Image: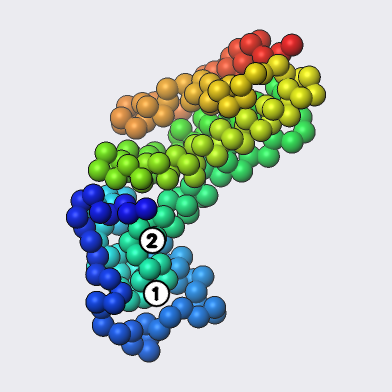
Amino acid sequence: MALGSAAGHKEDAIAGMEAPSSMDAAPTPGRDSGKRRQIVEAATRVFLEVGFGEASMDRIAQVAGVSKVTIYNHFGSKDALFAAIITDLCDRLLEPLTGYRVEGGSPEQVLTGMARRVQEMCRDDAIMSVYRAVIAESPRFPELGAMFYRLGPARAVANLAAWLTERSAVGDLRIDDPEAAAEAFLGMARAHDDVRRLLGVAIADDEAAAEAHIRSVVAAFLRAYTP
């Protein structure tokens, strides 16, 4: 994958840089995790501020308080660093959906829990900021959007689809295409709120209305797929 090639923002290769000093030596196990986290958090801030194409390694190094050599020692390339950013963002921000445990409970209980998590994510400013940044950069860097989708939304669909398959196997539901059903359910649960928030349209935080919508979505889904 070469995310940065489309805009011509090629960073210095390791071979063309000065040899690492004793402070910038290759990562050691004792400090590797903390330093990687420091770099990823700094790169995330820069990415959300200026976008992928304009996020230079010089700026990331400045914000992280490290040298470019240190960044390359940990990640090897700008593409690898931004792959780590997207992975981290999806793991942290989309975990309520991608990591939602759907074992146990009735179909109504499980689907209600999933719909609530969708609604919570649509109201999360951090998640909406990431979506805006990825959408803005995807026309120039389609690999970025594809990676975000694969690591985030696609995992949420697969997670729900796997549970729908299990419920169909035991006869609780009757679903011929669990993946399509999962996409339909998650789409209904969003209630267009994500589109409004992506566009900066104000939405009242009405918990009663949100719960009513969730009940309606779950009831409609069960009417369509209960044997």
Residue 205 image offset from top left, x and y in percent = 46, 28
Residue drawn where x is 61% and y is 43% of the image: 99
Q: Quadrant of the C terminus?
A: top right
Question: Identity of the amino acid at label 1?
Answer: Asn
Question: Identity of the amino acid at label 2?
Answer: Leu
For mark 2, give the secondary structure.
helix
> How many residues crowd around disc 2 within 10 Å: few (fewer than 14), some, or many (20 or more)?
many
Query: Can residue 59 be seen from the camera position used here?
Result: no
For mark 1, give the secondary structure.
helix
Residue 134 lies, with reference to residue 112, above or below; the image says below
Residue drawn where x is 27% and y is 65% of the image: 57
**Label 1, label 2: how far apart the Cα atoms are:** 11 Å
Lateral position of residue 170 relative to residue 16, left or right: right
Q: Residue most toward the bottom? A: 22
Question: Badge 1 is on which residue?
Answer: 73
Residue drawn where x is 32% and y is 27% of the image: 201
User: Which residue is nearer to you in this view: 36 or 171?
Assistant: 171
Residue 110 image offset from top left, x and y in percent = 69, 29
Question: Badge 2 is on which residue?
Answer: 81
